């Protein structure tokens, strides 16, 4: 084997050396082929068989050693041999050459790569053993990667050489025929007028639409492959079944019903999902109560003396439940039924990509949309089962205000609830393993909010890694590690705010062997398709953003693709989010830290709110507007706003980024005075001032002096 490898290396060196030493590249250029086309055609007329053999051998060598020029050679086949014979010769030559390249790379690299990285590659190896032929076929049909790269990468996998050859030849046949046809038509041009003849224009157009045709064929074959494995019902009960009645599921089902298609929405608990019952609505309601309490406590700042308020926590929680009851009818089964959605109560189980079972009922459907959401992450922390812990789901069942509340987690949920409970009177201890809270934001954002939380009485402990919970005669406690030392923190109740885990268990995904991401979400492509092309996923179960507004955004694309075929890619061009603390924090696009990590050049324009008229009038002038732009340009790479109503203010930047508008457009728009929205205009004006042509000003000064006489 060693001698064979040395021989192959020597052969590769000889071929590549000859390529450069004898300047063989000139013979694979379009200019040379055009200049010699007449000679080559005459030789083919006199020696058809010999010319076919020579052409075949040259093509095989070029493909085997990954020598550039395959496209020119394919066009030449059409010019020399016509559509039929050209397609036959190129089809076999390219497949033989690709297989030779595959075998060469396998001999040299396969064993070394598998021995060294076998464990890491095992998931890929399993997939190749199972569906390698079909996977390669789809790659050949829709050539997103250069052929030589496909040959190399596939040689490192366990795919068989025979499977590789067959999948390559069948997969490349369509594109081969199209390019050979283009070559045959171009060879017939004898004048400039020939360039606009119908056959030539059709051939050029066919080259352009081939990827679309190939994608359609692959989609059809995937569906048939799916049908053979699981069976396909002859008749469908539904156009789509949506699993999950949260934000994503509600929006998807409404869009499908609005298109007059038949849709079933399956929900095992209450329609409305986390956002209505345990997320956005109750948390913002609680934050509002806390904000009012802080205003009263600081009433003297506004010239109001002796103002005071006593917190009735039971009444606060009843207010929250009342708000939920007011919103519930919007998400109720009755309303959705009236809009054409069949609401099915129960737990869904996916028996096959076309059958969903709910209890005893089996629903045959063309498409399935997974919108099962996520739940609070509860890590396996030692001793956790000994304490009566809370999560963002269960905290709303509290009837009395905890005296000492420990909040584990420094993300948006942890910060919002820590501030809310502190404002209402709890002694809040917030523990975060990272060196600062809100690690997704820039350090200055984290620092500003940290100072505000501490000033309001929150004991903020960053750099503390949770180790275990415990209970003794004095009550519950947490032990955390900080700089090598163990810190014990007593508490009355603990709230876990350590992230959220996608709901992927218990409804058939395991049986379908549906791939998941490293974060536990359902793996989807840019069209929100899972590994099964008729099963889509959107919202928290799919990621990558776990926001209610992003769930609705994805739901639109999932619903449209489920109805009309997967042709629309979901756009993440301008994804905004907000943390509803006081001050609010909102962002869209890149942060400064992310721009540095990605090596993106940028400028920062910063407008502080400390002298902003409306912010001063409202007594909330902490914060800033920060915008990132490319050097010298007003295109918006990202914007961060810290301050009152930041969640509303960020909308102007979201609109601008979505539609390609720069800071100049924002500066040119009229903003009402006095509003917080003016801060965006002032930031845009700050950018304009920094980019004025300074060299012009002395000349302007002279001109105006001349005007004055």
Image: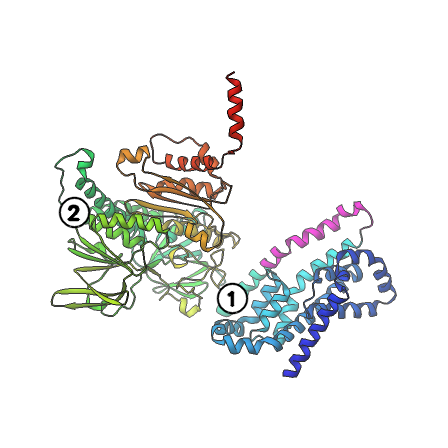
Which of the marked residues, 1 or 2, is nearer the chain's N terminus?
Answer: 1
Helix, strand or loop for disc 2: helix
Q: What residue range appears in magenta?
A: 189-215
Please report the residue visible at 37 percent of the width from the left and 36 percent of the height from the top: 679
Q: Which mark is residue 315?
A: 2
SS majority, magenta: helix
Where residue 683 appears, x then y in whole percent?
Answer: 41, 38
- In the image, is 478 to the left or to the right of 168? left
| Residue 73 visible in the current orientation | yes
Q: Residues within 10 Å of mark 1 (few under 14, many from 20)?
A: some
- In the foreground, 306 or 482: 482
The answer to if 210 sits in the magenta stretch is yes
User: In the rendered view, would you say 693 is above or below 433?
Assistant: above
Question: Quarter of the image containing the N terminus?
Answer: bottom right
Q: Whole-percent x and y of residue 596?
A: 45, 53
Residue 77 in view in this figure: no
Residue located 79% across and 70% down the image: 53
Q: Nearer the viewer, mark 1 or mark 2?
A: 2
In the image, what residue occupies the spot 72% across and 73% down?
A: 14
Mark number, residue 526? none
Q: Which residue is mark 1?
A: 227
Q: Judge left or right: residue 34 versus residue 384.
A: right
The colour mode here is: rainbow
Task: Give neighbour class at mark 2: few <14, some 14-19, many 20+ (Cα, 10 Å).
Answer: few
């Amino acid at each position: 084997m060693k001698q064979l490898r040395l021989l192959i290396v020597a052969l590769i060196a000889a071929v590549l050396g000859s390529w450069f030493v004898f300047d063989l590249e000139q013979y694979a250029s379009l200019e040379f082929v055009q200049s010699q086309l007449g000679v080559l055609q005459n030789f083919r007329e006199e020696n058809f068989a010999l010319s076919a053999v020579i052409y075949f051998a040259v093509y095989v060598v070029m493909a085997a050693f990954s020598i550039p020029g395959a496209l020119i050679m394919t066009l030449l086949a059409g010019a020399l041999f016509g559509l039929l014979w050209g397609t036959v010769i190129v089809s076999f030559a390219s497949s033989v050459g690709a297989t030779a390249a595959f075998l060469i790379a396998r001999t040299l690299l396969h064993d070394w790569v598998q021995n060294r990285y076998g464990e890491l590659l095992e998931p890929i190896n399993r997939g190749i053993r199972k569906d390698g032929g079909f996977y390669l076929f789809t790659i050949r049909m829709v050539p997103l990667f250069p052929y030589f790269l496909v040959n190399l990468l596939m040689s490192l996998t366990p795919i068989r050489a025979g499977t590789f050859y067959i999948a390559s030849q069948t997969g490349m046949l369509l594109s081969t025929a199209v390019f050979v046809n283009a070559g045959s038509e171009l060879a017939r041009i004898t004048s400039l007028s020939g360039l606009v003849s119908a056959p030539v224009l059709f051939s050029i157009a066919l080259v352009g639409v081939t990827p679309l045709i190939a994608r359609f064929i692959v989609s059809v074959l995937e569906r048939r492959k799916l049908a053979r494995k699981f069976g396909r019902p002859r008749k469908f009960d539904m156009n789509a079944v949506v699993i999950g009645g949260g934000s994503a599921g509600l929006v998807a089902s409404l869009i499908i019903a609005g298109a007059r298609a038949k849709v079933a929405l399956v929900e095992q608990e209450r329609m409305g999902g986390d956002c209505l019952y345990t997320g956005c609505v109750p948390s913002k309601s609680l934050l509002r109560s806390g904000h009012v309490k802080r205003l009263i406590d600081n009433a003297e700042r506004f010239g109001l003396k002796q103002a005071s308020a006593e917190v009735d926590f039971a009444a606060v929680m009843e207010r929250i439940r009342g708000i939920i009851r007011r919103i519930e009818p919007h998400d109720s089964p009755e309303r959705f039924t009236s809009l054409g959605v069949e609401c099915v109560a129960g737990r869904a189980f996916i028996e096959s990509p076309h059958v969903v079972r709910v209890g005893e009922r089996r629903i045959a459907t063309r498409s399935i949309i997974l919108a099962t959401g996520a739940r609070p992450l509860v890590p396996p922390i030692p001793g956790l089962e000994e304490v009566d812990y809370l999560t963002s789901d269960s905290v709303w069942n509290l009837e009395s205000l905890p005296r000492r509340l420990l909040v584990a987690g420094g993300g948006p949920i942890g910060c919002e609830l820590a501030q809310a409970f502190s404002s209402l009177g709890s002694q809040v201890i917030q523990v975060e393993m990272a060196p600062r809270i809100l690690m997704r934001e820039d350090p200055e954002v984290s620092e500003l909010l940290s100072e505000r939380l501490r000033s309001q009485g929150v004991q903020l402990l960053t750099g503390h890694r949770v180790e275990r919970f415990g209970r003794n005669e004095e009550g519950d406690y947490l032990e955390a590690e900080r700089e090598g030392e163990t810190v014990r923190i007593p508490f009355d109740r603990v709230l876990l705010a350590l992230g959220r885990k996608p709901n992927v268990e218990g409804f058939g995904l395991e049986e379908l062997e549906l791939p998941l991401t490293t974060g536990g979400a359902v793996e989807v492509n840019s069209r929100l398709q899972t590994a099964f092309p008729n099963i889509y996923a959107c919202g928290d179960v799919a990621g990558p953003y776990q926001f209610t507004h992003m769930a609705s955004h994805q739901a639109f694309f999932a619903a449209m693709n489920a109805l009309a075929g997967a042709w629309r890619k979901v756009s993440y061009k301008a994804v905004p989010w907000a943390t509803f603390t006081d001050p609010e924090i909102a962002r869209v696009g890149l942060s400064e830290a992310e721009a540095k990590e990605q090596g993106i050049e940028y400028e920062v324009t910063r407008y502080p709110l400390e002298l902003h008229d409306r912010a001063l009038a409202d007594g909330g002038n902490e914060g800033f507007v920060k915008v990132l732009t490319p050097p010298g340009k007003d295109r918006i790479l990202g914007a961060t706003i810290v301050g009152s109503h930041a969640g509303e203010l960020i909308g102007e930047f979201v609109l601008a980024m979505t539609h390609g508008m720069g800071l100049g457009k924002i500066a040119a728009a009229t903003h009402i005075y006095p509003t917080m929205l003016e801060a965006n205009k002032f930031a845009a004006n700050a950018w304009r001032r920094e980019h004025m042509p300074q060299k012009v000003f002395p000349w302007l000064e002279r001109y105006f002096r001349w005007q004055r006489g």
